[in-house]
Structures are given as C-alpha cells and as structure tokens.
Amino acid sequence: MQELFDLAFARIDRAGARRREFSKAWADYIAVHPWDIDVRETGEREFEILAVMREPAPIELSMIFSDWLSALRAALDNGLYAWVAAATGQNPPPKAERIQYPICSTPGEFVDQRKRLSGVPVEILDKLEKAQPYRSPYGPESNLTYWVHELARTDRHRAAHVGIGRVDEHRIRLRVPQGVTATFDETVRPYSHIEGELAVGRFITSKSISRFDVAADLTGVVIAPEIRAWADFTLNCGRQSLWSRMVYTEFFIRHHLENMAAFSDATPAGGFKTFDIDEAQVASADGR
C-alpha cells in the first residue's frame, strides 16, 4: 500500500507550499502599509499611541489558509485509509466510506467514533485512542490535531477564517518639543492581535503639549499575520507566531503519518523525518 501512503504524505508537502504562499500574500499586504499611527490625548499630559487598521487583510489570505487546513486534515484521513488497507490487505478496505481519522475531545466522543469505524481493525482503533487530544496532559486544546480538526470544521461548515495582524515586536520612538520629556507606561505590552485599533503605547509628558506636537515612529513595531480563531493558542506555555504554529502543526501531522506508515511497513518519500525508525522499532519490541 506504499502508493496510498505516498499520496497521504504529498498532502503535507502541499500544506507546506500553501504556508509559503500565505507568507508571500501577507508580505504583499503589509507592503502597502495598511495601518496608520494615531496619537490620542487621554488626560492631562497623558497620551496613547494607536495602530489603526485602514485596510483589512485580503480574502486571499483566508482562502490560502483554508487550503492549508484542508490538506492537513486530508493527510490524516488518507493516512488512516492507507493504514487500514495495509492491515486488512484490501483496497478498498471494509466499510471504506466510513474511514475518517477520529479527533476527539472526550472519551465519550471516541466511543461514538469507534462504533462508526466498525470496519477498522481493533488494534488500530486502540492505537488511535492513545493519540486523541483528550489524552493530552494540558487538555485537548493544547493538542495540534484538535486545532486542525476544529479550524477545518469551522472553515468547511460555517465561514472561512479571517486573517488579522498581531504585534510580534514592540519598540516605539517618540519626538516631542525641546524641553519636554516623555515617560512611557512600561506595563503596556501589546503582543496582541489588531482588530480595528490597538493601543501600542502610553506615555506622560513633563509639560502640557498638544498631540500634534508628538511624532511617533513605529518602525520598530512588527505586525505579523494571525488567524482570529487561533489567536489565543499557546504552545509549550508560550505564544508562538502563526508561522511557527503552522510549521509545528505540519511536523505534528507528519509524525502521525510516519507512525501509520511504520506500522504498515511503508516508507515515506525522503525517509522518516520526525523519529528514528530503528529506535522506534526497538522500543516497540521492548514494549516501551
């Protein structure tokens, strides 16, 4: 069933190509400087610096992200199909129309999926159960397959995901009239997504001045792409850029596929990249 696995791995390669396309589309978008800078007076000698979106992210970004999600979700489904075909020696395998990689947030959901996948060998179902998001020690939402499933389901059945901007680097320079000093509020750390406008800085001046006397330089503020529905996700107890999350997700899905291939005595094109197949076989033989 090597050809079936080759097709599944090709889906991940396609996802990587869509990710790079997404990056280029974002670069084209920000090249036209779609955010303005506004200085707003909020009190006596108190000011706020805002990044204001004047042109929303293009729909093209949503479409590319949709293709990326679709490729990864299909890779899991194709991989499971290939695994079942290899295990049963049949192509198509029994009840092929029901085969879809299960991604479950609770044990009860997996019980229901197990019934639906009645044509899948029990030993495969047992292995799938051990890899479910509800098994993750920090909860299902810490698992990247959970996000592939949830984001793809929203994309298919409700609406495409919206591309927005997020502050990834933060350094502001000010120019105020001679004889005036400005003190920044260092508690403002706006590493957050921008929808409409976002306060990226606050400061107090030593003397009363007009906001028109203030010039703000935000060239040190880097605005990176974000997907609204995925914006609050953390990985390894920290926030990663969208690009990093996409790379990690492709790696994670590939790891699942490589496990399926290893159980089926198939070899990915280019070999195993997410683990050492020899060490994995030894561990399996030792019962680890």
Image (cartoon, rainbow, N blue to C red):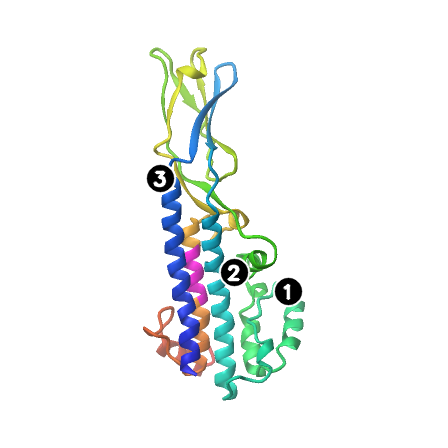
Q: Contact (CB < 8 A) between labels 3 and 1? A: no
Q: CA distance from mark 2 to mark 3?
A: 29 Å
Which residues lie in the magenta part? 246-253
As helix, strand or loop, the secondary structure at mark 3 comes to loop
In front of the other: label 2 or label 3? Answer: 3
Q: Residue furthest bottom?
A: 89
Q: Which residue is mark 3?
A: 31
Question: Which of the numbered marks, if any, corresponds to residue 106?
Answer: 1
SS for tag 1? Answer: loop
Disc 1 or disc 2, which is closer to the eye?
Answer: 2
Q: Which residue is mark 2?
A: 148
Q: Within the magenta stretch, is there residue 252?
A: yes
Question: Residue 206, relative to residue 15: is it above or below?
Answer: above
Q: Earlier in the sequence, mark 1 or mark 2?
A: 1
Foreground residue among 287 and 58: 58
Q: Is residue 228 above or below residue 205?
A: below
Task: Tell me residue 62's x, y (percent).
Answer: 49, 51
Quadrant in the picture for residue 206: top left
Disc 1 marks a residue whose amino acid type is Thr
User: Seen in the image, is 212 located left or right of residue 116?
Assistant: left
Kind of residue at disc 3: Ala
Position of residue 113 relative to residue 25, above or below, is: below
Residue at (54% x, 59% y) in the render: 152
Q: What residue lies at 35% left-to-right and 39% top-to-bottom?
A: 31
